[in-house]
Image (cartoon, rainbow, N blue to C red):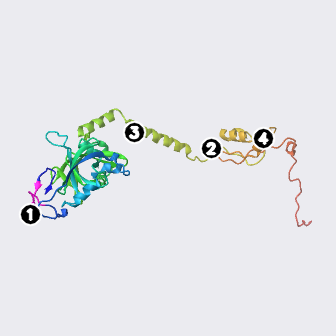
Amino acid sequence: MYVDDSDNEFDMDMGGGFGGFMPQQSFHMRYSGRQRQFRRFYSAYPIAAYQHGNKMDANYGGKIFMPPSSLDEISQLEVVYPLLFKLQNDEEEEQGKKPRTHCGVLEFTAEEGRVYLPQWMMDTLRLSPGSAVEVINVALLHGSLVKLQPQSVDFLDISDHRAVLENALRRFSALTVGDIITIEYNGREYRIAVRETQPSPSAINIVETDLSVDFEPPVGYVEPTAQSSRASLSSADMNGRSSIAKDIHKQEESIKNEAANLRFQAFRGAGTRLSSGTERNADSNKPASLRSYASSATPDAGQTTDNSMEEDTPVALDLPIGTLFFGYRLVSPAGSQSDQQDEPKFQGQGRVLRQRRKR
């Protein structure tokens, strides 16, 4: 005997139907008349209370922790694999229906009399820690289609949401219509509601099946209309550029100004003589920046420095762009020969090697 998501029982014979539908071969059923069914009550606790290692990742899946005794009992029954269970809260009832969901089993390592559920299952079944929950072994049809609805527009920030869901659904064994599951991606939690399943209208098995996923618009999402887009464009034209456009324009202008200041300009400086002779208005012809550097870096003749280390330390020469520097003007020390009158240069007489013949 197999129980689907609506508590309907199906009898199977070797040559007949299966209550209106045929079971899939992937069930690997062994037919021997009516099958025995696993059905027990346990105390439900969230996975956060699990004390045998850190299992917080199980909160983002659809599998539970059961005690080892349940495995011993299930191994003696002729059940359908993979193991699927229906969880039901018999103490709560709304509009004549009891809260229920479907799940798989992750480990048989829980304490006797306890089962550990993901937090979203505790919320779906409206269970508090220690409440009684009924665990029933069921067989579900393999799903072909599921329609999901994200509960926040933040889900649209994921670039490849289908790949993220494909990876997240590997932690689930079954999906039930009305459940709001929780998945994790990049350190953030996303809540997704199950709106529709096929071929079963209430719950499906998603283990080793080719499942198509469809999406409804997220909760709070408003699709822009043509009129609203036109109104936004007209208001932007009336008010001029938006604040973002103005900021971008200011940044572009500042970058252009900096590039213009740093651009090389040839022959912008004044000429400087290489000879040591007298210069007429030499200081007036030099650029102000060069005179300032030369005056600050060249000491006066009578200037003395107390710190000898500073005299030996070279001074960094920082000239404006486009300025050529050929050295400082020579300043002779006091009392040198350069202060006396310059002697005439080249006083010798010219001589030739061959004497002229007298005529």
What amino acid is found at the position of numbered circle 2 in the picture?
A: Pro
User: Of the residues tagged 2 and 3, which is closer to the observer?
Assistant: 3
Q: Which span is picked out in magenta?
A: 9-22
**Which residue is at the front of the view, 351 or 117?**
117
The numbered mark at residue 13 is 1
Gap in angstroms between the C-alphas marked 4 and 1: 111 Å
Residue 26 x %, y %: 19, 63
Looking at the image, can residue 357 be seen?
yes
Report which residue position mark 3 lands on: 245
Looking at the image, can residue 209 be seen?
no
- Left/right placement of residue 282 relative to residue 323 reads right
Report which residue position mark 2 lands on: 320
Q: Earlier in the sequence, mark 2 or mark 4?
A: 4
Q: Earlier in the sequence, mark 4 or mark 1?
A: 1
Question: Is there CB contact under 8 Å for labels 1 and 2?
Answer: no
Position of the C terminus, as image quadrant, is: bottom right
Instruction: Name the element at disc 1.
Output: loop
Circle 3 packing at 10 Å, graded few (<14), some (14-19), many (20+), is: few
Gap in angstroms between the C-alphas marked 2 and 3: 35 Å
- Left/right placement of residue 14 relative to residue 113 reads left
Position of the N terminus, as image quadrant, is: bottom left
User: Of the residues tagged 2 and 4, which is closer to the observer?
Assistant: 4
User: Of the residues tagged 4 and 1, which is closer to the observer?
Assistant: 1
Residue 69 x %, y %: 26, 55
Instruction: Name the element at disc 2.
Output: loop
What amino acid is found at the position of numbered circle 4 in the picture?
A: Asn
Report which residue position mark 4 lands on: 307
Q: Is residue 213 magenta?
A: no
